[in-house]
Image (tube, rainbow, N blue to C red):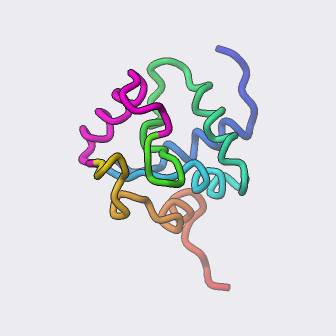
């Protein structure tokens, strides 16, 4: 296996916490990984996943709530099927707002509850 950067590993860790039946945008994942504004890095990190990785890459969608692969491409079909298998139904090609994971949920899962500021 090739060497991956700590940033890429952090992104994989965040993506691994997205619950089944939920999705997050590339931008959300970047923010939760401590890299705001690095949505494209999230996409690049997901491309580096080894084959058969348990990281649920398919739960990451674009800011419009859509799958980023070209519609009808094999990749789009694979991601769409995986989301359907988890109960995420796209409406006009877009994940409903109810499927979007709340950032504070993932923040608490990754870092623990906020102790009050």
Residue 66 part of the magenta segment: no
Q: Viewed as shown, does residue 12 lie left or right of 77?
A: right
Location of the N terminus by quadrant is top right
Rendered location of residue 83, percent (x, y)? 32, 40
What segment carries the magenta color?
A: 68-89
Q: Viewed as shown, does residue 46 lie left or right of 95?
A: right
Q: Viewed as shown, does residue 113 lie left or right of 94?
A: right
- The residue under the point 40% across, 24% down is 73
Rendered location of residue 64, percent (x, y)? 49, 54
Q: Could you say which is closer to the camera, residue 27 or residue 117?
A: 27
Rendered location of residue 85, percent (x, y)? 24, 38
Relative to 45, is 31 above or below? below
Q: Could you say which is closer to the camera, residue 103 or residue 88?
A: 88
Rendered location of residue 39, percent (x, y)? 66, 47
Relative to 41, is 37 above or below? below
Residue 87 part of the magenta segment: yes
């Amino acid at each position: 296996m090739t060497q991956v950067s700590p940033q890429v590993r952090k992104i994989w860790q965040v993506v691994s916490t997205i619950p089944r039946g939920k999705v997050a945008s590339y931008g959300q994942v970047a923010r939760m990984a401590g890299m705001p504004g690095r949505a494209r890095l999230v996409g690049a990190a997901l491309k580096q996943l080894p084959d058969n990785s348990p990281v649920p890459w398919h739960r990451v969608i674009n800011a419009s709530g859509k799958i980023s692969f070209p519609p009808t491409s094999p990749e789009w079909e694979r991601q769409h099927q995986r989301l359907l298998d988890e109960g995420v139904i796209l409406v006009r090609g877009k994940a409903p707002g109810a499927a979007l994971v709340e950032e504070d949920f993932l923040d608490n899962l990754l870092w623990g509850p906020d102790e009050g500021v």
